[in-house]
Amino acid sequence: MTLKNQLSDSLYQSYKKNTQQAYDYEKTISYHRAQTEKLSWIRFTTWRQRKIIELFLKRIEKNSDIKVLDVPCGTGIMTDVITKYTTNLLSIDISDDMLNIAKENYPQGEYVNLDILQLNSLNQSFDLVLTIGILHRLPQDIRNKVLYNISQISKKYIIVTFSKDYYLMRVKRIIMGIIFKNYKPAPQPIKYSTFAKEICNQGLTIIKKIAVVPFLSSEIVVLLSKKTNK
Ligand SMILES: C[S@@+](CC[C@H](N)C(=O)[O-])C[C@H]1O[C@@H](n2cnc3c(N)ncnc32)[C@H](O)[C@@H]1O
């Protein structure tokens, strides 16, 4: 059954608009500039994410050539961090504009245009799957399908980010919304207890979690591993 048939029409349309088709050429260019050139919040949080991911890579890297999947890879911003630890990296995204920028910046990489919900069509598995910067956009149904897909394709480790919903963060959102007209908080934050339950349902264990910017950002980077007795 296709995803379209499994979801209500409005949920499916929102998924298409806010994730699958969220990055056209102009948005991609401005996202990449914000990540790399401008003095911006996105640049700062991307820098912090890279540091945290490197910390996790150091922790799990046991041999020099672990097989890694970066999905969605976006502009390939994590590529040089990952390739410090392995040469065996596959990068996937659904946007050709994103993939073109990634190829321009990191021509040594291997890139495939694929929907994260179609990962089984790769017929491959990976020691580590990175899923950075997408769960915070997905409603529960689709988020769980993504978690299922990445847990199926991972042999051992997964690194994900999600947006944590808690009281102080809600207050911050209200204040930021009043101060900044263009303020766009993560559309699908979730309580930590909900996230932990969803992770457990997929046969995964949380090894370590680190806030990207404690108190100022709701984004958390989490290192997961597959339960051995699954
Ligand atoms: C906020 S960016 C994050 C990219 C990257 N991981 C980073 O840290 O910058 C979200 C990415 O998800 C991609 N995307 C959205 N829906 C997707 C889907 N269904 N399958 C694969 N990629 C998708 C977008 O094209 C975009 O590149």
Image (cartoon, rainbow, N blue to C red):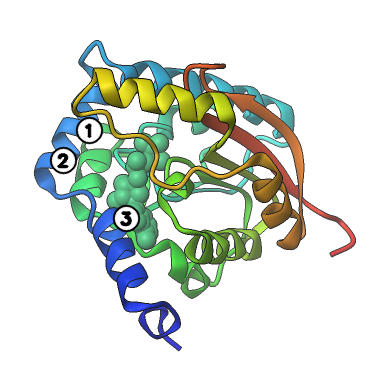
Of 171 and 31, the residue lying toward us: 171
Res. 31 mark: 1
Closest to the observer: 171 or 99? Answer: 171
Tell me where residue 161 appears, x and y as whole percent.
53, 39
Disc 3 crowd, CA 10 A, few/some/many (<14, 14-19, 20+): some
Up-down relation of residue 166 to residue 16 (above or below): above
State the image coordinates of residue 185 (x, y, percent, origin top left). Answer: 36, 34
Q: Which amino acid lies under the numbered mark 2 shown in the image of this protein?
A: Lys
Asked if the residue under mark 1 is in contact with the one under mark 2, i.e. CB atoms within 8 Å, the reply is: yes
**In the rendered image, which residue does mark 2 sit on?**
27
- Ligand 1 within 8 Å of disc 3? The answer is yes
On screen, residue 90 versus residue 153, left or right, reads left
Query: Can residue 202 be seen from the camera position used here?
Result: yes
Q: Are marks 3 and 1 in contact (CB under 8 Å)?
A: no
Task: Point out the tag, 2 or 3, that comes first from the N-terminus.
Answer: 3
The residues bearing labels 2 and 1 have C-alpha atoms spaced at a distance of 6 Å
Q: Residue furthest top?
A: 39
128 w.r.t. 38: above or below: below
Residue placed under numbered mark 3 in the picture: 19
Assess mark 1: CB under 8 A from ligand 1? yes
Three-letter residue code for mark 3: Thr
Left/right of residue 115 with respect to residue 153 in the rendered view: left
Q: Amino acid at mark 1?
A: Tyr
